[in-house]
Structures are given as structure tokens and as C-alpha cells.
Image (cartoon, rainbow, N blue to C red):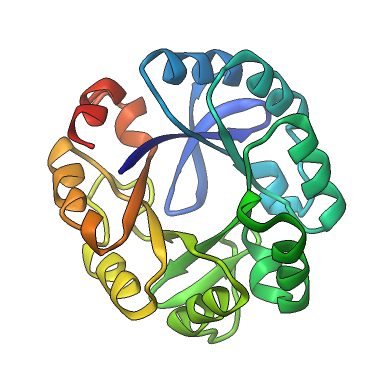
Amino acid sequence: MLIIPAIDIKDGCVVRFVQGRLDKKIYSRDPVKTAKHWAKQGAKLIHVVDLDGAFSGTPKNLDALKQIVRAVDVPIQFGGGMRNLRIIETLLDYGVARIILGTKAVQDRDFLKKSFKKFKDKIIVSIDTKVNRILTKGWKSSYGNKDILKFAHSLKGIGFKQAIYTDVLKDGTLKGPNIKGIKNLLKETGLSVIASGGISSLSDIQRLKLLKKKGLVGVIIGKALYEGRFTLAEALKLS
């Protein structure tokens, strides 16, 4: 099971939000230094999100991204404002290992099919949920009454084998992950899942580890690492 440190970038700084709210806390003004720190601690994959891009629909922190890719010998998965095929191709050319799709994936099935056909496992969809609704546009909008499981099944029908699952109500709260939601997604869809949101302790990671055989392949961790609840090295020992 991958333990994946998160680097969320807003206005050039590494920040963490709570449930997607803009009451951000700045943890670093140097995303590249942060990426080097996670790489030094043993990260096998780093999750980078351009929050400005997620809100605006166009990536805004590409200079920082390019510097991170050059600075660390660790695969980077990147999301935030990925709304057309051209920008996906450009970022893969930068050396990004995998692109995260969110808003556009939910809104435009034709785009999603074209993206998968062209890029295959170089893209992954993030299913961002709040009270059984799918959120888009930097978690500021809910996309109608789109059913989470139906959407996940549609991803599998296109050919996707993995998805990221985030419970927005858990994100940044340090109150533990939505184990029930993760279990349900694994059971009902057969997709491999990377879970995100709410990780607060090493015991949370141990609980999630029990889902490995059911298809949980990774855990994205943000605030718990930045607040010093445990180190990445400690978490990796449990994986």
C-alpha cells in the first residue's frame, strides 16, 4: 500500500485547507523544499495539487511543478485545473508521472473517454464526495445528484482500474478516514482505490491496511504529516 504525501499549492505556498474551506494554513513557502523533504523520507509517490488551478480551471503553479519534477527522483501525480487534452500532454512532457482529473471528468464523459484512450494509466480520476454528492470546481460546487457508485462504474466501463476517493468532510479534520465509504466503493465497483481525507494517526493507517486485500492500493496523507502527528518514515513502516 502506497503512503503518499500531499503537497497542496496555493499562491505558491504549501497549504492545507479544512473540508475545502479557504481558511488555509501555510506550512511552507517553498514547495520544492517540501518535495525534497518527502523524497528524503522515502516517498514512492508524491501527490501535488494546484489549488489555484482547481478553483480557476487552469493550472497556475506550473513553475513550482516543473521545479519539483526536476528536483526529486520520485514520481509526481498532479491535479488542479486539468480541463483539456493539450495541458495533460504538456504536463506529461514535463515529466509528471500521472495526471489527476476531477471536474472535467465528472462533467464531460466524452472528454474522459478521449483522455483514457490517449493516455491510459497516465491519468487517474479523483472522486471527491460530500454527503454522497460529487464535488467539482475545487470542491465549491456539487454536480447535481450524480451517483457516486454509478460514476465509479462508468469509470470502470471506460477502462480505468484505479480511482482516488476523497471524503471532503473528512479532509483536513484529523478525525479519521471514512472507512465505510472506502469499503463500499471497493466492494461495489471492484476498482482499486487510493483513499484520501481525515488520516490522523498511525492507527488510521493500520485500519486502512486491512483493506489492502480488498483493493486499497494507497493512502494520501496531508495535514497529519504537516502537523507532526507522525513522520512519513513511520507511516511507511506500516505499509
The percent coordinates of residue 80 (x first, y second) are: 66, 48
| Residue name at image x 20 percent, y 27 percent | 237
| Residue name at image x 68 percent, y 31 percent | 11
| Residue name at image x 36 percent, y 35 percent | 223
Left or right of 164 in this view: 159:
right
Looking at the picture, does residue 30 appear above or below residue 120? above
The percent coordinates of residue 30 (x first, y second) are: 59, 16
Kindly tell me whether residue 176 is visible in this rendering.
Answer: yes
Q: Number of marks in the image? A: 0
Left or right of 6 in this view: 116:
right
Looking at the picture, does residue 110 appear above or below residue 201? below
| Residue name at image x 49 percent, y 75 percent | 152
Quadrant position of the N terminus in the picture: top left
Quadrant position of the C terminus in the picture: top left
Left or right of 89 in this view: 216:
left
Kindly tell me whether residue 168 is visible in this rendering.
Answer: no
The percent coordinates of residue 231 (x first, y second) are: 26, 22
Residue 141 occupies quadrant: bottom right
Looking at the picture, does residue 163 appear above or below residue 40? below
In this view of the protein, which residue sits in the foreground, 26 or 115? 115
In this view of the protein, which residue sits in the foreground, 89 or 178? 89
